[in-house]
Amino acid sequence: YTTRHPPLMQTGNMKAAVLSLIILLSSTSVLSDLMSCSYKAKDGSSFNLKSLAKGGKGYVVTQTVIVANNDILINPAYSGTQNITIQMDVCQNVSQPMFPTLCKGLVSPAYMITYNDAGSANKCYSLGEFNTGFFSEAPGSDGVYLSFLHGSSADGSDVDRYSVRMYFICSSNMRGPDLEHVKDFYQVHIHTFTKLGCPSK
């Protein structure tokens, strides 16, 4: 006795298989971009950032940022300033965290270190996982950016997690990386001005 599946089920299975194949190929392509540290845009222009990968401690930037209170729109006052250190590398995980004890158990292409009132480092956040990374064109055809998602929890829950966008802006003069800002939804923006942010065809 042979069981025959209805044609609709066979079609459904075929669609699911094709969709799975497309997702797999897309994931493989994104991972390939990340491993080669290069990206080809939709218009055919290409970027190669491999020479920016540094290894070791990578890039370290400490900046003082303004910390706004929760009702900033109602009462435009500031609660003060805070020092933040960003430690990052390009297209690879940071291999030597500055604060190995504080960052224990975290593996990431970028970390954010915060400090207490006494000026001592007190928290280390992962800004994303390497295998979530992907490239995209920067707004206004102004270079390319690299995103990493699913970093440390921002508030103790799994809902709000840190992420990072590393912008590489077309410029003849190398400058950065610099911390631009931390957006309300815990997305950290970092800018680097470099000739490698200029597209080639």
Image: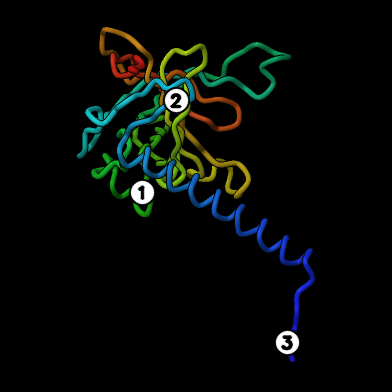
| Position above or below: 173 against 167 | above
C-alpha distance separating marks 3 and 1: 52 Å
Q: Quadrant of the N terminus?
A: bottom right
The furthest residue to the bottom: 1
* Left or right of residue 10, residue 155 in this image: left
Mark 3 vs mark 1: give the one in front: 3
Nearest the eye: 84 or 36: 36
* Mark 3 closeness class: few <14, some 14–19, many ≥20 residues within 10 Å: few
Q: Of the residues shown, which amino acid type is indicated by label 2?
A: Ala
> Mark 3 and mark 2 in contact (Cβ < 8 Å)?
no
Coloring applied to the structure: rainbow
Label 1 to label 2, Cα distance in Å? Answer: 29 Å
Q: Earlier in the sequence, mark 3 or mark 1?
A: 3
Of the numbered discs 2 and 3, the one sitting upstream in the chain is: 3
Q: Amino acid at mark 1?
A: Val
Task: Return the residue at label 1.
Answer: 107
Could you tell me which secondary element the residue under label 1 belongs to?
loop
The front one of 86 and 128 is 128
How far is the residue under mark 2 from the one under mark 3?
51 Å
Residue drawn where x is 26% and y is 13% of the image: 174
Q: Which residue is mark 2?
A: 41
| Label 2 neighbour load within 10 Å: few <14, some 14-19, many 20+ | some
Where does the C terminus fall, quadrant-wise? top left
The image shows residue 37 at horizontal and vertical percentages of: 32, 34
The residue identified by callout 3 is 2
Q: Secondary structure at mark 3?
A: loop
Q: Nearer the viewer, mark 2 or mark 3?
A: 3
Task: Provide residue 158's location: percent of width, then percent of height.
Answer: 60, 49
Q: Secondary structure at mark 2?
A: loop
